[in-house]
Amino acid sequence: MTSPLFPGPNAGLGAAGATRRTLLKTAGKATAVLAAAALSLTACSTGPVSSASDAGSTASASAQFPVTIKHVFGETTIKAQPKRVVTVSWVNDDVAIALGVVPVGVPKNEWGGNDKGSTPWKDAALEKLGAGFGSAKAPAQFSEADGINFTEIAKLNPDVILGAYSGLTAEDYKKLSEIAPVVAHPELAYGTSWQDSTSIIGKALGKEAEAAKLISDTEATIKDEVAKYPQIEGKSYIYGNLEPAKGDGVNVYTANDNRPKFLTAIGMKLAPVVEEKSKGSKEFFVPWSAEKANELDSDIFVTWVPDSKTAESIKSDPLLSQIPAIKGGALVADSDNTLTLSISASSPLSLPWSLDTFLPQLAKAADAVR
């Protein structure tokens, strides 16, 4: 997976190009790969985490199948409760694990991840399930640095591929569907909320009731933590990306993106100038000329930065420093890639992890608003 800063267009060209390259590499080999996978597979993992004590719930879950899930490319029917789950992109693995299902394969977190190619929240959840990386029950990991890894996914012989939050293309979907049923994103690439991802994956795994409770519990946790910072309530915001050293102006995330969705959900208000740009848009960000930076009016401006020096560069940049929130001292400049990942690829595991660090930053900026 590439940087989550611009998973569509930025990676867009890169990911699409990589996908095409991967397809070219694998097109003539697909049948051989699948055959080899079938022959070489051992019972290398996992499936739904169950035991004799939850045999009743497993039987109940099985009774929910077949299920049919609609998505951007049509609909997918899953005939029986999946036992060999593979995920693509971000979020989907988190959700499956949060629902007690250890996938047989997951992508590495190659941006914002740790030395295991994972995240702190995923590591903790897998450990609770006795499937931490390095253990016998751990998911296999594969790289998505060059796009969807069809070859490695095929080797895992999945019975479902989860991409409820993803930017799968029609080509990706078609190719993956030759391997197993695919649950693609419902509408916008990288635009699925964590709540919708959880509901969709819960249905795909026969865990709808568990998914509903997971959403409710996570929202309650967020609400309780946000209540500690009342100064955040009602503040207007823009979540963008400022890198003065790159000289390509400003990028602003639209209402379609999970970052603004999260800030809105905790009681903040997306700035009118971005609301206007979001109307009817299917994009998750819009480019913005640095020459018009002074028009990006909001109480607070949030951005990822590659390092702490960049935050100072933004404040001294002759154009970017004219952004009203920056002039007012209400800039949140986050250089922690893992923290950025936890918000941009938000999940029921990542958001609770992020709150202790992210909310105080927002509150400090809110205190600067006059």
Image: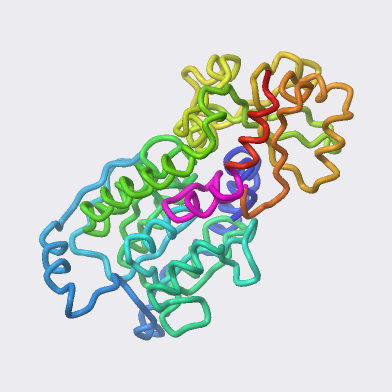
Q: Is residue 48 left or right of residue 334?
A: left
Q: Quadrant of residue 249?
A: top right
Indicate whether residue 98 is drawn in magenta.
no
Indicate whether residue 351 is drawn in magenta.
yes
Q: Please say if 85 is above or below 364.
A: below
Name the chief secondary structure element in magenta: helix
Looking at the picture, the colour scheme in use is rainbow
Asked if residue 366 shows in the view, the reply is yes
Residue at 25% x, 46% y is: 69
Q: Nearer the viewer, residue 321 or 108?
A: 321
Residue at 38% x, 43% y is: 219
- Indicate the position of residue 301 as horizontal and vertical percent values: 67, 28
- Indicate the position of residue 51 as horizontal and vertical percent values: 22, 78
Residue at 44% x, 85% y is: 136
- Indicate the position of residue 214 as horizontal and vertical percent values: 32, 52
Asked if residue 25 shows in the view, the reply is no
Q: Nearer the viewer, residue 336 or 30?
A: 336
Q: Quadrant of residue 365?
A: top right
Residue at 37% x, 60% y is: 98
- Indicate the position of residue 24 as horizontal and vertical percent values: 56, 58
Q: Please say if 205 is above or below 31.
A: above
Q: Which residues are magenta?
A: 340-358
Q: Quadrant of the C terminus?
A: top right
